[in-house]
Amino acid sequence: MKKSIYIIIAVVLSAMLSSCASTYQYCQVYETKPVHQNGQLKKGNGVISYENPQCIIDYCFWSNGGTADFSFYNKTDEIVYINLSKSFYVMNGKAYDLYRGREWSHSSSVGVTSSMDYGYGESQSEELSVGRVMPSLTTDGVVAARASKSASRFASIAARDAGVMSTSNTVTIKEMEIVAVPPHSKKYITTYNIKTSPMLSCDLQRYPSHSARLDFTAENSPFCFSDIISYSVGEGAQTTIVRNDFYVSSVTNYAEPELVTMEKREEPCENMRDPDYVEPSHELYDKVVKANLCEPASSFYNTYEVTTRKKLYERDKTYFYNPQYQAYVMSNAQGKGIVGLVGILGFVALGSLLIANGL
């Protein structure tokens, strides 16, 4: 009997101790710079751009893990052919093929469910995603196929008529070895992640209460990466090779409150709503990088967390993530005091067991 009591006591104490632990969120931000002067920072969000008489190549690295994807704009009056089998992504001297013979499947359905784009959905403009922090973590590896770098946020609305039949179609798209870019048009090329896990260093505080930073030059940077792009203007023309080199110029670890702020999301106007649109019962917010903290388009980030009983920083508990709207909402009073109540009940139960058994 006493053995069972000790087991119960151990479980109660374990629950009480674990309830005292808190999870703290951090973000590691990498700022980048072009190695050569042919890459210039545009005005505004810091997009890195390369330009010659034939093309404009723009980079927007901002994402969880970073992305070396680029857009290619054809300035000429002829079709430009990008040869992906002779184009490469290079990280710290190791080359990776841009052409990998990939296939992507795109599914669409009509019937039971419709969706409303809140203004952050897929777009042909990288600027929509700049400065926004995605709530979920990414895993190590190659970036999956994506039509753009915009952060997709959709709110699904169930159709009122439950009797509507649903149909779906799936289209498989094969990667092209040669990408043709029409005159005075732009195409997006998907490549690789830059760095998908936080960098650890004895010289960089891993869990700062505010922020901790390391600066680098092109000579001592731990991460140097490049795009080697082969293309020709018109069929049978001579191949032109463009190489754009970049390096990580600084790495900064931020406690989440130091990095982000909450930006209120505007609801779609009446003419942009579906007939069955239901206005959210709460105001919706997005996590946005604080102004002037970095130039997002020429930077990228990795998020990480730690659970500990040690107090690491002051944090704002007024928001929580709502998957239904893929946004943050202000929290209410629910859940407050639960930890204290668990502790009190645990002590009461423990005392009762001790008294009942004469311990």
Image: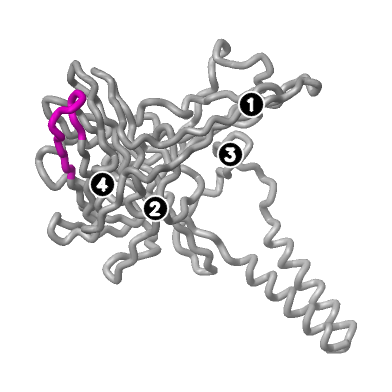
Residue at 42% over, 26% down: 123
Q: Amino acid at mark 2?
A: Asn
Quick one: label 4 or label 1, which is nearer the N terminus? 4
Left or right of 309: which side holds 128? left
Residue placed under numbered mark 3 in the picture = 330
Left or right of 32: which side holds 170? right
* Mark 4 to mark 3 CA distance (whole Å): 45 Å
Residue 223 location (% of width, % of height)? 24, 57
Find the magenta span and give its range.
Answer: 231-244
Residue at 19% over, 16% down: 77
Nearest-to-viewer mark from 3 and 2: 2
Q: Nearer the viewer, residue 25 or 343?
A: 25
Nearest-to-viewer mark from 4 and 3: 4
Residue placed under numbered mark 1 in the picture = 109
* Mark 4 to mark 1 CA distance (whole Å): 36 Å
Tell how many labels. Answer: 4
* Mark 1 to mark 3 CA distance (whole Å): 33 Å
